[in-house]
Amino acid sequence: AMQAISIGDDLYEKLIKDEESLNMDMAYEVIDWFKQAVIRTREVTEVEIEAVALSRLGRLYDQVLKIKYKAKEYLMRSMQLAHSMHPRTFNSEGWFKDCAEILERYQKETVAAEEEKWNKEREEIVKGLEKEMKGIEKADEKDSQEFLRYVYRVFPPKNKEHKLEGGLKKKGFHVEHDKLKKILQKAVVHYHPDKVDTEKHGKVWKVLSEEITKRLTRRYERMK
């Protein structure tokens, strides 16, 4: 199995260094050698070598063939095998580092793509919330107690158990610094967008929650 990996490694180096254009025949020859290594390891249960071979396959699909979904399959399997050998660790091994770095890049790309998609969607939602946004901004000019009264009255949390503390509901009622700080902290939890179930309450509520939480957090941090 190690011999198959070694041959595959040599061919891989030639593939990425010696060839001006991608030699598909050589690329698939490299794949065949690494796949052979995987098959041979299964015959004798050499888990580590199988993990190495899978990592090599993942790297090739990522860096040479640019087939991301296939690369991810191999890399994830390699990682699973590495973790199955706990308490052994492979953090200093090149194959494991390749695996971890590529998967981390994929994760970041996925998050970035999701954020970009949400930001575009969010912009459209905000356009339709002109009245609500003006109300929030106007209330934000007032003190924290007034702002809390406003958001809980106009945009009550979807969880019925999340309520503004009794005394603060009354206009003109004032609470001491430490208590207000705790109320703001609770309010951040009540409105936090990460807790919003968009399937149930919709994306409009998520955007409103983001805007309210942003202002509540700013007020809370000013009190520290």
Image: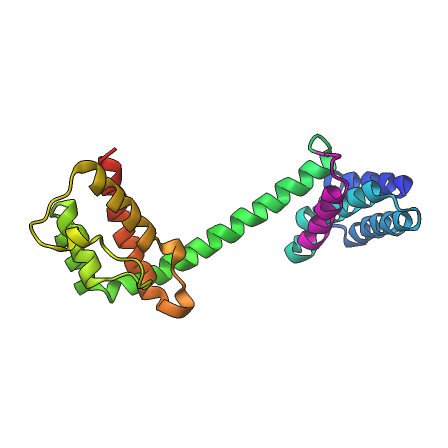
Residue 212 sits inside the magenta stretch: no
Residue in the image at 72% along x and 48% along y = 80
Snapshot quadrant of residue 152: bottom left
Q: Is residue 177 visible?
A: yes
Magenta-drawn stretch, dominant element (helix, strand or loop): helix
Choose between 163 and 84: the one closer to the eye. 163
Q: What sort of colour scheme is used for the picture?
A: rainbow
- Residues rendered magenta in the picture: 71-90
Residue 204: x %, y % from top left = 31, 65
- Of the 4 image quadrants, the one containing the C terminus is top left
Compared across the picture, whether 17 is left or right of 172 comes to right
Residue in the image at 34% along x and 50% along y = 189
Residue in the image at 16% along x and 46% along y = 144
Residue 195: x %, y % from top left = 39, 56
Residue in the image at 43% along x and 54% along y = 115
Q: Is residue 11 visible?
A: no
Residue 65: x %, y % from top left = 70, 52
Compared across the picture, whether 49 is left or right of 171 comes to right
Q: Residue furthest left?
A: 172
Q: Residue furthest right?
A: 44
Q: Residue furthest front?
A: 166
- Of the 4 image quadrants, the one containing the N terminus is top right
How many marks the image carries: the answer is 0
Compared across the picture, whether 128 is left or right of 92 comes to left
